[in-house]
Amino acid sequence: MSSSSDIIARPSPAREGENTDQFDLMVAGKPYIAWDAYLGRVRDESAERVWQFNQERNTEKRMKLAEGFVTLLQQDKGKSSIALPFSCEYGFNIRLGYDVYIGPDCQFIDVCPITVGNRTMFGGSVKVYTPAHPISPEERNGLKGPEWAKPITIGEDCWIGGGVIICPGVTIGNGVTIGAGAVVTRNIEDRVVAVGNPARPIKKILADGTTIPIPKA
């Protein structure tokens, strides 16, 4: 639900000689050609905004710059914070709830939407990847072939440990802890501790904060 405190980031409109056909396919998660004139310009504009963001050492001023390329929701309930350095591909496909913390050297490749719930925190060097590519090298065809992406959703009150990699199409539930260095390749249910490559739940987190082991399947 939107509120007066929501800051919705959007890409610039198409110019003469450009069209949004490939952009529309991209955000819908359908195969598209990345080396399109409009998409290339939008990426360049995003790169400039992210570069400016990474030059600002003052957190409050830096998050003001973030309003130009990241969607920030319900910030009247608690300001989110992104540490330096930070990188993303488009920015407007990133939606952060309130009280979100993103640690240093995180990378969000947001070809499709990346949605992060309230009070979720990321350790350093977390990588969140939405893009997917053909397995066949002939279909990939270097820079000329199609690619696509799958959205990633991370729930509320999660802790994503340092060095975690989150793969395309994954949904992580509420109240989840992902151990450092895990590779998340499939959905993770609410209130569990998940570790490893591929990440698997090993503990259930109870309402009183204690945990119980989850038997191996």
Image (cartoon, rainbow, N blue to C red):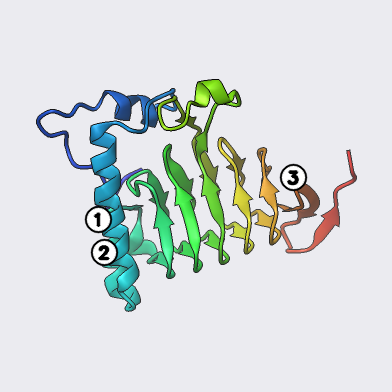
Residue at 85% of width from left, 48% of height from top? 214
Residue at 40% of width from left, 52% of height from top? 88
Residue 60 % position (x, y): 31, 74
Q: Quadrant of the C terminus?
A: top right
> For the residues marked 2 and 1, what is the alpha-carbon distance in whole angstroms?
6 Å
Q: Amino acid at mark 3?
A: Pro
- Would you name the residue on which mark 3 appears? 198
- Would you name the residue on which mark 2 appears? 65
Residue 185 % position (x, y): 67, 40
Q: Amino acid at mark 1?
A: Gly
Element on which disc 2 rests: helix
Q: Nearer the viewer, residue 69 or 74?
A: 69
Q: Residues within 10 Å of mark 3 (few under 14, many from 20)?
A: few
> From what the image shows, is residue 135 above or below residue 76?
above
Q: Of label 1 and label 3, which has the lower sequence position?
A: 1
- Would you name the residue on which mark 1 appears? 68
